[in-house]
Image (tube, rainbow, N blue to C red):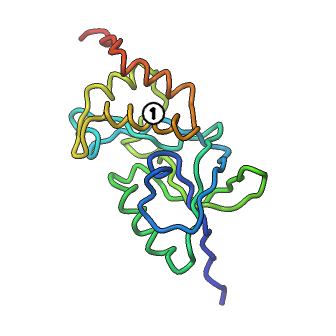
Amino acid sequence: MTAPPIPPEWVFGYGSLMWNPGFPHLERRPATLTGYHRAFCVYSHHYRGTPERPGLVLGLDEGGQCRGVAFRVAPEAWDGVVRYLDERELIGYAYTPVQVPIVFDGGSRAMAHTYIADRGHPQFAGKLASADSARLIAAAAGKAGSNRDYAVNLINELEAHGFPDVHLHELLEIVVSGRLKSPPGE
């Protein structure tokens, strides 16, 4: 008989979870995840768009690295935290929960629970040009409000918390400026 796997004690956040975790935690620390990067790569048909006019939300996509925040969770709270996160993150099921190695500032390492974009899911947008992403973001709204407001607030929060991203900032400038070109044929 084998023992059940021991869950990690850390959760890795890369978007709004970083400043709005919504679950009890014992500690929060900056950390880096290698092998994935933060991107607007998931179509939103629920919170920030509709099936007819999808929006875009953040996901972790393959390649590169991502700076984020890791939260240490008490062992007795772990199952409840994962249930909460599954309800929050798996709407539409375009994400996959995984355990990943992270490196804290200072060099120590741990395994963390996070959610990556499911590349096989129909709501996976993949790598879009900044102008195409901006056009989708500017036009979409869902149950939680406009996709534009979500993207602007999210990117501003990332920068304010010390997590700037050149590609996301470029996207922000296009969305805010309104310099959106229509695709051919429109």
Q: Which amino acid does label 1 sit on?
A: Asn
From the top left corner, tell me how far across and down residue 88 is, in percent. Answer: 37, 58
The quarter of the picture where the N terminus appears is bottom right
| Residue 140: quadrant of the picture | top left
Please give the name of the residue rendered at 53% of the width and 67% of the height, measured from the top-left corner.
25
* Residue at 57% in and 68% down: 26
The residue most toward the right is 107
Q: Where is residue 44 in the image (x, y as percent from the top left)?
A: 32, 41
Residue 64 vertical position relative to residue 111 in the rendered view, above or below? above
Nearest the viewer among 128 and 168 is: 168
Residue 83 position (above or below residue 139): below
- Relative to residue 78, is residue 87 drawn left or right? left
Name the residue at 50% across, 25% down: 169
Rendering quarter of residue 42 = top left
Q: How many labels sit on residues?
A: 1
* Farthest-out residue, bottom: 1
Instruction: Give the residue at x 39% y 26%.
Output: 133
Instruction: Report whether 64 appears left or right of 184.
Output: right
Q: What residue is pinned by disc 1? A: 156
Viewer-closest of 176 and 124: 176
Point out the image quarter for the C terminus: top left
Residue at the extreme front? 160
Sort mark 1 into few (<14), some (14-19) or many (20+) by Cα contacts within 10 Å: some
Residue 84 percent coordinates (x, y):
40, 66
Q: Is residue 127 above or below residue 69?
A: above
Q: In this view, does 180 lie above or below 59?
A: above
Q: Which sits in the foreground, 155 or 88?
A: 155
In the figure, residue 64 lies in which quadrant?
A: top right
Q: What element does badge 1 sit on?
A: helix
- Residue 18 coordinates in the image, percent (x, y): 50, 50
